[in-house]
Image (cartoon, helix red, strand yellow):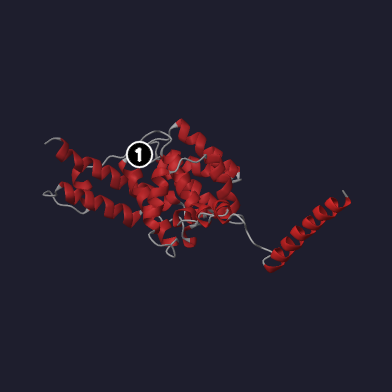
Amino acid sequence: MEILLLIIAGAVLYYLYNGFQDYMKNPYKIEDKEQYKKEYNIDDTPYVPETTRDRIQKTEYGILTMILKCIASVDGKICKLEQELLKNMLDDIANELSDYKDARLVLQDIFDNSNEDLDDLASKFSSLTKGEYKRRLKVIEFLFAIAYADGHLDDSEREKIIDVAAIFELNNDDFNKLYDDFENEYSHNIEISKEKALEILGLDENYTKNDLENAYSDKIKENKQNVLLNKNLNKNFNDTSTKILRDIDGAYKILLLKFNQD
């Protein structure tokens, strides 16, 4: 019996010795290489590189683009003047993002496809523009401009703008002045004769539909205010652009009747 136990003990020691020798030769040996590959396959890495769209969307300009989308879509429609103002605003934003390739296309994609919460966007924009009170005030002014573009301020538009202004922590007097200025400007209708409309858009009696569309876009671009420029932060949008833009839009509508009657 003792001999049997000695044989067994010797066998165990021999096995352990050989195993130890094998480990010392290759202490990091992986027995099941296929299992290792399956668990740590580099193709399965959860890291996904940020796209240009991702990076732009996180900037104050990307967030501003989404805020514009929220306000523009509140009443379910976007009029001609609103379209032009938004298009030009995205052009101005793209200029600020010139370091990004295809920034204008990316901004359009963000505008067309974003569906973020307005309050959350306003909070993010406010955080990114701390110490830039006048810039936030200017954004509210532009939100009023696009909301009033169709001639009146919808109740839902007003409530949304009030919410954003509150998150921006605007002074009540500053906000009320903006609101009153736009209300006063849009409290009366503008009357433009056909002759005056032609003069405003720089057209003659023989204008074509294409002439009209191009003249309208050019005049809006020429007379709109770039609210992103520091030099414009102290300029009142109503003093520099609103009435002129209303005249251009009114002239366009009068001259458009020529083609609606055909």
Q: Is residue 165 left or right of residue 87?
A: right
Mark 1 residue crowding within 10 angstroms, few (<14) / some (14–19) / many (20+): some
Name the quadrant containing residue 78: top left
Measured as percent of width and height from the top left, residue 33 is found at: 57, 56
Q: In the image as oriented, which residue stretches furthest toward the right?
A: 2
- Is residue 118 in view? yes
Q: Which residue is at 76% across, 59% downward? A: 16
Measured as percent of width and height from the top left, residue 34 is found at: 54, 54
Q: Which residue is at 50% across, 49% downward? A: 63
The total number of labels drawn is 1
Residue toward you, 125 or 32: 32
Q: Which residue, given by chain and number where applicable, does mark 1 sit on?
A: 78
Secondary structure, mark 1, is loop
Measured along the vertical axis of the image, is residue 15 above or below residue 75?
Answer: below
Q: Is residue 199 left or right of residue 104?
A: left
Measured as percent of width and height from the top left, residue 245 is found at: 34, 48
Residue toward you, 53 or 37: 37
The C terminus appears in which quarter of the rendering?
A: top left
Residue toward you, 180 or 11: 11
Name the quadrant containing residue 185: top left
Measured as percent of width and height from the top left, residue 260 is found at: 16, 36
Q: In the image as oriented, which residue stretches furthest toward the bottom?
A: 25
Amino acid of disc 1: Ile
Q: Is residue 34 left or right of residue 244?
A: right
- Is residue 200 in view? no
Residue toward you, 50 or 144: 50
